[in-house]
Amino acid sequence: GGNQTLRFLGEDPAAVPGAVAAAVCVSVPCDLTTTERALARPGNRIYLNNFLKTLRDKVRRKTRTFPGLVNLDRLARVRDFQDFDDLFTAPRHGFRDAAQYYAEASSLPVLEAVRVPTLILNAKNDPFLTPECFPEAQARANPALFLETPATGGHVGFVPPWPGPYRSELRAVEFLGRVLAS
């Protein structure tokens, strides 16, 4: 969701409705090409397999409603996100293949165009994010873009001492409150 939100905000800033006053994006894979490679690393295999199982199950359910949507034999052989995106995501969205989809759907190239105050909160220890997903140069060049990179938080973790709200939620409320009050 964060990558799509950033893509929406930066692709055509004039088309962003005025009611969108600010945004917060947490654990954002701004560069889909390098993120796909990171997810394929052996240390992330358990996550990848879980994601792929969920995606395969969803696609199988969709084929009950839409027979022929995808080749189920090929779906069973999917071993990584590139396989899945080549088979399903890219063709469904008008892309030639996963490589074109990753290049054209990544938010990284449009971050400098974002005009709505936007916080990107990406933990340094997020196992899915690569250095390209920490857009420091874009944040320095764009006064509407705020990048925060805490040392810990994992991928959408930001777990507090229990009980309590997640640190990412607290930071989002704080950022939005400050922006909306000004």
Image: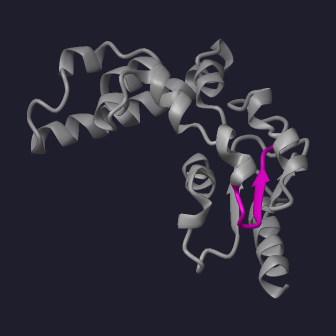
Magenta stretch mostly in which secondary structure?
A: loop
Which image quarter: residue 67?
top left
Give the x, y percent position of residue 40.
58, 17
Q: Nearer the viewer, residue 174 or 120?
A: 120
Q: Which residue occupies 76% across, 41% down?
A: 154
Q: Nearer the viewer, residue 130 or 154?
A: 130
Which image quarter: residue 164?
bottom right
- In the picture shown, does residue 58 fall above or below 117? above
Q: Which residue occupies 40% across, 17% down?
A: 83
Q: In the shown orientation, is residue 118 left or right of residue 72?
A: right
Q: Which residue occupies 22% across, 34% down?
A: 60
- Start and end of the magenta stretch? 114-123
- In the picture shown, does residue 104 fall above or below 112? above
Give the x, y percent position of residue 133.
74, 35
Give the x, y percent position of residue 122.
78, 45
Give the x, y percent position of residue 87.
31, 22
